[in-house]
Amino acid sequence: MEQKRQPKHIGIVACSAEGASLCYRTICVEGAELLGAHAHPEVSMHTPSLAAYMERIDRSDWLGVAELMLASANKLTQVGADFLICPDNTIHRALPMVQSRSSLPWLHIADVVADEAVRRGFRCLGLLGTRWLVESEIYPERLAARGVDYRRPNDAESHEIHRIIMDELVCGMFTPEAVTSHQRIIARMKQQGCDAVILGCTEIPLIMNDANSPLPTLDSTRLLARAALHRAVHGPNPFT
C-alpha cells in the first residue's frame, strides 16, 4: 500500500502578534479542507519582542531587523521546520539579507499576493500598509514583474493608515473609525482607477474585507497562510 505523504512542517517567523495569530489560525482552520477534520500541517512559530523589532525599524536598521529574522529562522530550523513564512509585510524589507543566510526556503508574501492579483485578473492595485511598507519597493517590484500597475496612498492617507496600524491594530484595538478611514482611502483609490486593494499590513484584514471595502481586497495574511498550506501539502509550486 502506498504510504500517504506527510505534510511539510511550516515555520512562522513572526513579528506582531495580531497578524501572526491570524496567519496561524488560518493555517490550522483551513488545513482541514485539505487534510480532513481537525487536521493541519505541523506549525512552529517564533516571535521576539515586538519592541526589539521597533527599535531597529525606527532607526532604519534593516540589517538589525534581518538579524532578528535570522535568529527566528535558525530556531525554527532546529525544531524541524521545512520552510518559512513571515506574516509581516514591513519586515520583508530585510528579507533579501536573510534568505542568503537561511538554510530553509521562504515564501515571499508579496509574490503570493501578486500571483493572486494576476490569477484574478486585476490590473491596478491600491497599496495599503505602514509607511515603511508603502515607501518601499516590496510590492512595486513584484507587481511590475507581472505587468500589474499600482497606486500608493497620498502623504496624509499614509500617515493615517500608519497611525491606525501602529497605535491601534497591532495592540488589538479595532474601531469603527478605523474602518471608516480605510473605506474613504480605498474609495479614492477606486476613483484613481484601482480595481482591487492590497491589504499590505497583516493586521488590516482584521477590520477590512470584501464585505466592507469599496474595492475587492487582496488579504496578504490569509493568502500567505493558504500558500503555505498548499506548499506543505502539495509541494513547492502551489500556483502551477
Image (cartoon, rainbow, N blue to C red):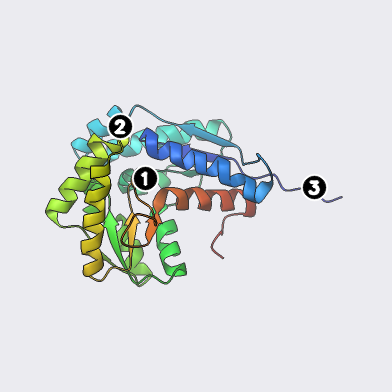
Q: CA distance from mark 3 to mark 2?
A: 45 Å
Left or right relative to 10: residue 121: left
Q: Are discs 1 and 3 less than 8 Å apart at CB?
A: no
Which residue is label 1 attached to? 202
**Of callouts 2 and 1, the N-terminal one:** 2
- Which quadrant does the C terminus fall into? bottom right
Residue 46 on image: x %, y %: 45, 31
Q: Are discs 3 and 2 less than 8 Å apart at CB?
A: no
Q: Nearer the viewer, residue 15 or 217?
A: 217
- In this rendering, the answer to whether 6 lies above or below 136 is above
**Residue at image coords 53%, 49%:** 228
Please identify the quarter of the rendering in which residue 40 is found.
top right
Q: Nearer the viewer, mark 3 or mark 2?
A: 2
**Of callouts 3 and 2, the N-terminal one:** 3
Please identify the quarter of the rendering in which residue 126 is found.
bottom left
Residue 97 on image: x %, y %: 35, 45
Residue 190 on image: x %, y %: 26, 66
Element class at badge 3: loop
Element class at badge 2: helix
Which residue is label 2 attached to? 171
**Residue at image coords 22%, 50%:** 181
Callout 2 crowding tier (Cα within 10 Å): few <14, some 14–19, many ≥20: some
Left or right relative to 167: residue 170: right
- In this rendering, the answer to whether 193 lies above or below 163 is below
Q: Are discs 2 and 1 less than 8 Å apart at CB?
A: no
Q: What is the three-letter code of the residue carrying label 3?
A: Gln
Which residue is label 3 attached to? 3
Callout 1 crowding tier (Cα within 10 Å): few <14, some 14–19, many ≥20: many
Callout 3 crowding tier (Cα within 10 Å): few <14, some 14–19, many ≥20: few
Q: What is the three-letter code of the residue carrying label 1?
A: Thr
Q: Nearer the viewer, mark 1 or mark 3?
A: 1
